[in-house]
Amino acid sequence: MTGPNAVTFRKVNKWYGRLHVLKDIDLTVAEGERLVLCGPSGSGKSTLVYCVNGLEEYQSGDVVVHGVRVSEDDGTADEVRPSIGMVFQQFNLFPHMTVLDNCTLAPTKVLGAARSEARDVALAALERVHIADQAEKFPSQLSGGQQQRAAIARALAMKPRLILFDEPTSALDPEMVKEVLDTMVGLADDGITMICVTHEMGFAKRVADRIVMMERGEIVADAPPSRFFDRDQGNSRVKAFLDQIL
Amino acid sequence: MVSSTGRAFAESRPSLPARAASWIWHNLFGTLLNTALTLLAGLLVYRIVASGLDWLVFRATVAPAEIRTCIDNGGACWAFLQDKWRLILFGMFPYDEQWRAALALAVFGGLVITSCVPAAWATAERRRWMTALWIVGAGILGVLMLGGLGLRQVEIRLWSGLPLTVMLASVGMFLAFFLALGLALGRRSRLPVIRWICVVYIELIRGVPLISLLFMANFLLPIVMPAGMTVPNLLRAQVAFVLFFAAYMAETIRGGLQAIPEGQYRAAKALGLGYWHSMAYVILPQALRTVIPSLVNIFIGGFKDTSLVVVISMLDLLGTANSAKADTRWLGLFMEAYFFIAMIYLAVCASMSWYSRWLERRLAAGERR
């Protein structure tokens, strides 16, 4: 937790039209840190994550990733994206490609890896999420949990320094949530920087170094799990939120 | 009747004639209305088939025969077609060299059929082979049609009939497709200038009938061109076709692009794929797949619309059929010529439509399986 910063938000503001979705966000995530973002829906947590790899633009302030200020206009967003993995709520696998091709596309086209090398890396990534045996199948032939693990493998195949998760288990049937969470716990143990938007408080308790809670575009709590889940804490908003979801 | 197990049921299954009889009874004569409709439709089919066969076969006349015999017999005058089929197929292409045009059609047909086999494009190595095959094929086609390498020169203005139709359609659709890709992407561009150019182009072209575009290409282009520069007739028509069909295909492709969920764009972007990479590997393969039926529809329409070049006095398949009926020896006959070219159009269009349905099923199977 004392390493250099992977991600720094400085006075970041974002509006959708007149809707102020991010208000003066200040946040740092250290290299190797595992951060869980939570909060009621519409609080701006997904938007915050999208600002890290430039899928969403922000109107003022700075988002700095690995020392580079992320901005679509300067083209710096393109620069940092290959080092940032992203896992979406809806998986967003490419349906016309096999799982393996999903995992080798970006390494070959973006990093310029040779096909055979990209294949080895992709198979290793699929092995790590325990679906190497599904490599030649198309996404639609997999269960939801397997698809999300394939999406994680696709992110891992780029050998990212940081992985963003945007509600990775929200679109899954309950019986598949566990296999995806277990995969994510495995990644957390490997020491990769993680920013994870999730409502899975059990997961947060288990792997997070810090839990950040947002409400209406503002950060209202930022604490390690031990303090965050402390029933006697003074933060009424966290209490209200936890009462609602637990 | 009622069996307790599937096996017993299979054994007690009625014989084929019995099942057929039952099917006919239930589907064709179940109710009074059904029976009436069946009889009516049957009568109609019988009348059409009978009179069709009468004209095509029973009262038809084959060579050697003269027009008088044909008229006396009252059926189709195949003797007329037997005399004129080479004129209809190859038009003004020098008679002794028409084997070259026929061979060119065969070579082109072979290339197209080979390209229609998905396995031919399955690996990078095969794709290179296919590209090489097409380059060599195009060279052979050029030599066959134009001459050279010991073959007599044939002027482009003599190209007519089926080779002209096929060329106008295939080259036209091929080039129009790539122009359409550019227009479709441009129409969704983030740069307003590019977007507006594409919108204006598409709307302008779509607002004008093809026939007037052909006239413009034919009469305006030579005026606009610098003095002393002549553009062959064929090229003018070709350009008009490309411009016209590109606008329609562009709108179809745009529809396909819009059908791709936002998440696909985001996932490609998040992986670091740039605009062109995302388009080439993620978005377009999916978008084009969804619009195959509509694209084939445009191909089919385009193939038939090439016959409009008769208005700028070019002899495509329809034009040569028209010139066949001008022969004084067969004056008054035309049905046979039109029937002949109709069959050619039908064969080509039906193949395209069959192929697109097959391709759709196959692609769908690839994703689900």
Image (cartoon, rainbow, N blue to C red):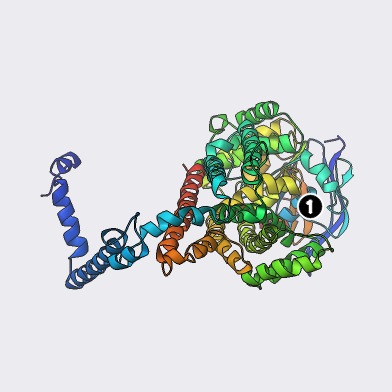
Give the residue at x 79% y 51%: A54
- The front one of B361 and B267 is B361
- On the rendered structure, is B115 left or right of A37? left
Q: Is residue B9 visible?
A: yes
- The front one of A72 and B34 is B34
* Residue farthest to the left, as pictured: B1
- The front one of A181 and B26 is B26
Q: From what the image shows, is residue A182 above or below residue B304?
A: above
Q: How many numbered markers are drawn?
A: 1
Image coords of residue B20 (percent x, y): 18, 53
Image coords of residue A232 (percent x, y): 71, 50
- The front one of B253 and A78 is B253
- On the rendered structure, is B107 left or right of A32? left
Q: Kindly identify which residue carries mark 1.
A: A51
The image quarter containing residue B330 is bottom left
Give the residue at x 69% y 35%: A156
SS label for mark 1? helix
Query: Pointer 1 indicates a residue of which chain?
Result: A
Q: Is residue A229 visible?
A: no
Q: From what the image shows, is residue B76 above or below residue B167?
A: below
Image coords of residue B156 (percent x, y): 66, 53
Amino acid type at mark 1: Cys
Q: From what the image shows, is residue A127 above or below residue A200?
A: above
